[in-house]
Image (cartoon, rainbow, N blue to C red):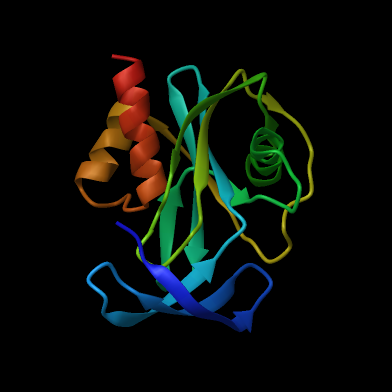
Amino acid sequence: MSEKTIQKDTVYEGKVINVERHDVIVENGNSGVREIVKHPGAVAILPIIGDKIYLVSQYRKAIEKKTIEIPAGKIESGEDPKACADRELKEELKMGPKSLEYMTTIYPSPGFLDEVIHIYIANGLYSCTADHDEDEVIHTVKLSLSEFKEKVIEGDIKDAKTIVSLLYYIQEHR
């Protein structure tokens, strides 16, 4: 199954995303329009120290709410995802990892977004200094595994990459 793009136009170019409009022919021969958000990709990190999982709480303008989620960030042009994970952890938590282990890669919303998120687990964290993005206000949240699971089940944590990281962690460490 596939769709053939007949025409493609960039309708918006932004700092983080671009938006394209694709005129397509679908498998049954009918035509359609697809609006696609282009994103350079991101990383997300599940940081663990002892029996505590370190999450971040921050305001997300798109949903007009504070969220609790794993640290994450956009991959810069030409940047290796693992190097990005190291950088983002330092920026958001002021901690560096002794080890970063790849967990999985997800498509957060493939119906209209081409973003991929590479998820890592970070162990052996140590304090460090790093600049953070000046337009971000981030607070650290420390939870035990059972508290983390409870917050997901109760709906306090709704972020998809965070929930996926929890599922992978539970599967690998049961």
**Residue 122, located in which quarter of the rendered image?**
top right
Q: Please say if 60 is above or below 80.
A: below
Task: Point out residue 21 in the picture as x, y percentages from the top left corner.
Answer: 49, 81
Q: Quadrant of the N terminus?
A: bottom left
| Residue that sits furthest to the front in the current view | 29
Using residue 67 as the reference point, say whether residue 170 is left or right of it. Answer: left
Q: Farthest bottom residue? A: 11
Please report the residue visible at 76 percent of the width from the left and 32 percent of the height from the top: 128
Q: Quick check: 117 left or right of 165? A: right
In the foreground, 51 or 165: 165
Instruction: Kindly tell me whether residue 61 is visible in this rendering.
Output: no
Query: Residue at (34%, 60%) from the top-left corner?
Result: 2
Q: In front here: 106 or 54?
A: 106
Quadrant containing the C terminus in the rendered view: top left
Q: Is residue 63 above or below residue 110?
A: below
Q: Residue 77 placed where, x, y %?
A: 74, 53
Res. 129 image quadrant: top right
> Residue at horizontal 35%, vertical 64%?
111
Q: Residue at x 66, y 50 (%)?
A: 75
Q: Is 118 positioned to the left or the right of 64 in the image? A: right
Closest to the observer, 40 or 23: 23
Q: Quadrant of residue 12?
A: bottom right
Is residue 155 visible in the rendered image? The answer is yes
User: Residue 80, percent across and down?
Assistant: 70, 38
- Residue 123, given in percent of the width and then of the height, sits at 57, 20
Say above or below: 30 vs 54.
below
